[in-house]
Amino acid sequence: MPLIGASPRNAWRATDGRIDLRRARRAGAPGWDLDAAPQPLTLDPDRTGILVVDMQNDFCHPDGWLASIGVDVTPARAPIGPLLDLLPRLRAAGMPVVWVDWGNRPDRANLAPNVLHVYDPDGASTGIGAELAGAGPVLQAGSWNAAVVDELTPDPGDITVDKYRMSGFWDTPLDSILRNLDLTTLLFAGVNADQCVLATLADAACAGYDCVMVTDCCATTSPGFCWDATVYNVRQCFGFTTTAAELGKAAG
């Protein structure tokens, strides 16, 4: 049966001149029961995807940008192991994996001063787009700096979305892609939990998505109180938290 749509998850079907608007569903697909906070959850795996945020060389590699300006990136590498175990299980269950990465234009023409100021407060420091000695331009799309760390190389069937701000939703096609995948529930992983992960998660919640932060697949190089506040706010205001172990058990 011919399909009309970029994804079979959200496609029309054409038969003998008639268009069927019904989206395909796995008959009897069971929900996944998870131990979560602030309450246990049951989610629909057919309408769930995972967003992996900023697991890139400039944030997580000892030769990347943050390390070059004196940040200890050891905490940022903590999600690598749990994600290595979890992502194949989610893919095997048919769950989309979406990598949401900084990937700036070479001319930085769409970046406002408030974005550039974050790590370049005096206008003369090694900020976004600056040349990093021995590596390349910081977080520039297509560069080594912006690539996902080698341990987590995306699969060919995964989707990558370049972002240009803390939130992955502003000035990007992320929302259109998620809706075209017919997703209503989003799992969140990556770094920094209190910055780009939280900003993207909060915007997703405001857009009506169900949001679940996978705590052991997230991390931050910020002080501990930032992590505590992030987990509190996710549970209090934006959604739920669970673990990779819980998702792995549900995936089988």
Image (cartoon, rainbow, N blue to C red):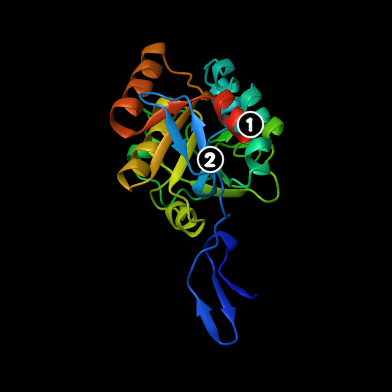
Q: Position of residue 182 (x, y in %)?
A: 48, 56
Residue 102 is at least partly visible in this image: no
Residue in the image at 57% along x and 36% along y = 131
> Disc 1 marks which residue?
86
- Compared across the picture, whether 14 is left or right of 152 comes to left
- Give residue 206's position: percent from left, percent from top: 30, 44
Image quadrant where residue 99 sits: top right
Instruction: Report the residue at 43% width, 53% height from top.
Output: 175
Residue 154, above or below 12:
above
* Residue ID for mark 2: 50
Q: Is residue 47 above or below residue 187?
A: below
Question: 184 or 217: nearer the eye?
Answer: 184
In the structure shown, which secondary structural element does the residue marked by tag 2 occupy?
A: strand
Labels in figure, total: 2
The answer to whether residue 43 shows anywhere in this view is yes
> Horizontally, is 22 left or right of 90 in the view?
left
The Cα atoms of the two marked residues, 1 and 2, are separated by 10 Å
Residue 153 percent coordinates (x, y) = 69, 38
Q: Residue 72 vs residue 158: left or right? A: left
In which quadrant will I find the C terminus?
top right
Q: Residue at x 60, y 22 (%)?
A: 77
Which residue is at the far top? 224
